[in-house]
């Protein structure tokens, strides 16, 4: 009888340890902004509509255009269809002079990756030290683009000096 209680206690401890290990390991890889520091944050409003709240993160908490990792975190304040996200990306890339065949391929990638967004959804792009890009929706990975030119080009929409929303840019890069 004592041996059976000992075995049950052992099994309980083993299962608890495994559960804790799984939970703690999940925190490290499921949170896309793990170990990154906020540089700045901004709200995009067009006329009287609030579109999203955004924040830029880097390893140091300081923005340097060619220093990675970088992450852009966006919390949407309204529903947006994926096709609208793709069209806006295309228009912004055209304004920034990104019109080559890479952008056509990237827009195809984004069409496969980006879902319809609901109010309150959190979309995060993390561009790692190798400039590989991974998208997260509500902290769950939804796909990646391993082209080293994609992440910096996508981030230019918000961070380029020629961005369509210079006030948002200034706040994101910490130049309030």
Image: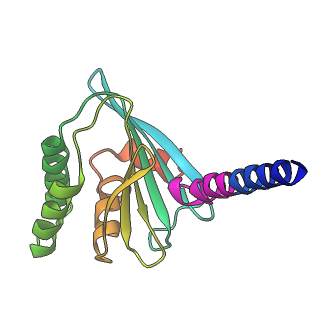
User: Which is nearer the eye, 50 or 31?
Assistant: 31
Q: Overall secondary structure of the magenta stretch?
A: helix
Q: Which residue lies furthest to the top in this view?
A: 48
Q: Which residue is drawn at 56% across and 53% down?
A: 39
Q: Picture coordinates of residue 100 (x, y %)?
A: 11, 73
Which of 158/114 is in front? 114
Q: Where is residue 69 in the image (x, y as percent from the top left)?
A: 50, 68
Q: Does the magenta stretch include residue 24?
A: yes
* Residue occupying image coordinates x 14% and y 52%: 91
Q: How many numbered badges does the structure rendering display?
A: 0
The answer to which of 48 and 119 lies nearer the viewer is 119
Task: Establish if 64 lies above or below 43.
Answer: below
In the picture shown, does residue 32 fall above or below 75?
Answer: below
Image coordinates for residue 115, horizontal then vertical, percent: 23, 45
Q: 112 or 102: which is nearer to us?
A: 112
Q: From the viewer's perspective, is 48 left or right of 33?
A: left
- The boundaries of the magenta stretch are 18-35
Task: Name the residue at 12% across, 48% down.
Answer: 87
Q: Please tell me in which quadrant of the rendered image residue 120 appears.
A: top left
| Residue 85 sits above or below residue 142 on the image | above
């Amino acid at each position: 009888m004592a041996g059976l209680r000992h075995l049950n206690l052992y099994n309980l401890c083993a299962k608890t340890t495994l559960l804790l290990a799984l939970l703690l390991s999940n925190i490290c890889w499921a949170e896309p902004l793990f170990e990154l520091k906020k540089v700045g944050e901004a709200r995009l409003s067009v006329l009287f509509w609030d579109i999203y709240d955004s924040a830029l993160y880097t390893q140091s908490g300081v923005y340097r255009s060619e220093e990675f990792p970088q992450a852009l975190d966006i919390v949407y304040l309204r529903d947006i269809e994926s096709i609208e996200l793709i069209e806006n990306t295309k228009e912004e890339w055209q304004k920034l002079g990104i019109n080559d065949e890479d952008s056509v391929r990237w827009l195809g990638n984004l069409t496969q990756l980006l879902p319809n967004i609901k109010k309150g959804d959190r979309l995060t792009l993390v561009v790692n030290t190798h400039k590989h890009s991974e998208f997260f929706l509500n902290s769950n990975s939804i796909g990646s683009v391993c082209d080293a030119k994609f992440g910096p080009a996508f981030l230019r929409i918000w961070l380029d000096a020629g961005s369509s929303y210079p006030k948002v840019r200034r706040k994101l890069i910490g130049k309030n």
